Amino acid sequence: MASESAIATDPRLSDSALRSLVDGLVLIDHNGRVAFWNPRAEELLGWKTDEMRGQTVSEMLDRIARRANAPAVTRAHLAAAFLPEAAATTIDIDLLPVANHGNRVAQVHVFPLCDPAAGQLGTGVLVRDITRERESDAMKSQLLSTVSHELRTPLASIKGFATTLLRQDVKWDEATERDFLRIIEEETDRLAEIIDNLLDMSQIEAGALRINKEPTQLRKLIREAVDEMRMRTESHYFVVDLPAELPRVLIDPRRIRQVLHNLVGNAIKYSKGGQITVTCEVENDHRGDLGHVVVSVADQGEGIPPQYLDRVFERFFQVDGAATRKVGGSGLGLSISRGIVQAHGGKVWVESTVGQGSTFRFTLPLASNEANE
Ligand code: ADP
C-alpha cells in the first residue's frame, strides 16, 4: 500500500509521461511564461526547450509564427486563442520544412489549465502532426474526382449509344446496330476494369492483397499473356525472346498475368507502332541464394522524361493526364503492378529515353526445387 501511494505522488512519473508524449506539449504558467516545452514540441516547432523556457507568450507566438508558411496570419490566429476570455481553440498551421522533414501540418490546440480550487493556473498548448491525415484527405478527394471522371466517360458513351439505338424515328441498318452494340460492350468492359483496379488498389493499400502461389511455367504464361494482347493492336509487332530452359517459379499466375497485361498494354498505348519486345532472363544470385528471373517489356514509343521514372509507379500519376485519358488510362495500372510484384518479393523499375522508348522490368524470386515439386 505504501509503495502505491509513493507511485501516485512521484512527480517524476507524470513529468516523464509529458516528456515522452507523441504530441508536442507546451505549458504556460500564470505569469504568462513558458514553463514546459517537451521534446516533441522541439521537433515539430523547431525551437529547443532551453531557448523557449521563460519566454513570454508574445515571444513564443512570434517564434512559432516564424516557422509557419503564413507567419502573419498564423500569429494573429494564435494571439486570438491566447486572449484572456478565449475558450479552447484549435488552429491548423502549415509549417515550413525543417531539418530532414518536408512541409508538415501541425494542429495546435490551445486550452486553459484549470484547477477546481485555484481557478486558471495557466494555459496548455498541444501540437499534433496531422500531415498524414491531410495527405490522406487529399488522396480521398483525388480518388473521388478521378473515379467520378473515369466512370463518367464510359457511362456517357454507353448511355449515348443505347439512347441512339432506342430512337423510334430512325431505322439503323444491321451493321451500324452491331457497331453501336460493340461499343457498348467495350465500354462496359472498361467500366468493369476500372472498378477491378480500384478494388485491387484498395487491397494493396490495406496490405490485404491475396496471392495464391503455385509452381508455374513462366514460359507458357508469358506466351499466353502476349498472345492475348497481340489481338488488341494492328500497328505493333511482337518479339518474344525466352530462354529454352526456364525454371518454374512460385507465383500467383493470375496476378502475374495481370502485370504482363498492364505492361504490354502500356507499351501498346504509349507507342504509335513498332516493335514490342518481351524477354525473360534468369539471374543467379552470387550470395548463394536461389536467384530470380527478370522479365522485360520494351517498346519504341514516346518514352518517359527522367524526372518521372519513379513517379509513374505512384497511384494516379500520369505523365500527361489529358493525353493519357484519351488512350483510356486511369493511372492505376503501374501502382497495382508494383503492389503485385512486391507481394511476390520482387521489384519493378523502368529505363527510358524520350523519343526512343521505354523498358519496364520486374523480378520474381526463383522457387526452390522442393517448392517446385
Ligand atoms: P495509365 O492507366 O494512365 O496507363 P499506369 O499506371 O499504367 O496508368 O501508367 C502511369 C503513367 O505512366 C501513364 O499515364 C504514362 O504517362 C506513363 N507510362 C506507362 N507506361 C508507359 C510506356 N510504356 N511508355 C511511356 N509512358 C508510359
Image (cartoon, helix red, strand yellow):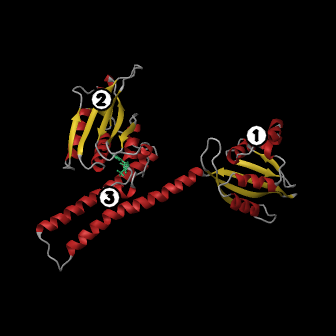
Amino acid type of the residue tagged 2 in the rendering: Glu
Residue at 32% in and 58% down: 326
Q: Mark 2 points at which residue?
A: 281
Q: Mark 1 points at which residue?
A: 16
Task: Classify mark 3: helix, strand or loop.
Answer: helix
- Residue closest to the far left: 174
Q: Name the residue under label 3.
A: 326
Amino acid type of the residue tagged 3 in the rendering: Lys
From the image, which quarter does the C terminus lie in? top left
Label 3 or label 2, whichever lies nearer to me, is: 3
Q: Quadrant of residue 250?
A: top left
Which of 128/322 is in front? 322
* Marks 1 and 3 in Cβ contact (< 8 Å): no
Q: How far apart are marks 2 and 1 (CA)?
A: 57 Å
Residue 107's x, y, as percent?
66, 55
Which of 99/143 is in front? 99
Tell me which label, 3 or 2, sits earlier in the chain: 2
Crowdedness of circle 1 by 10 Å Cα count: few (<14), some, many (20+)?
A: few
Label 2 or label 1, whichever lies nearer to me, is: 2
Residue at 83% in and 55% down: 122
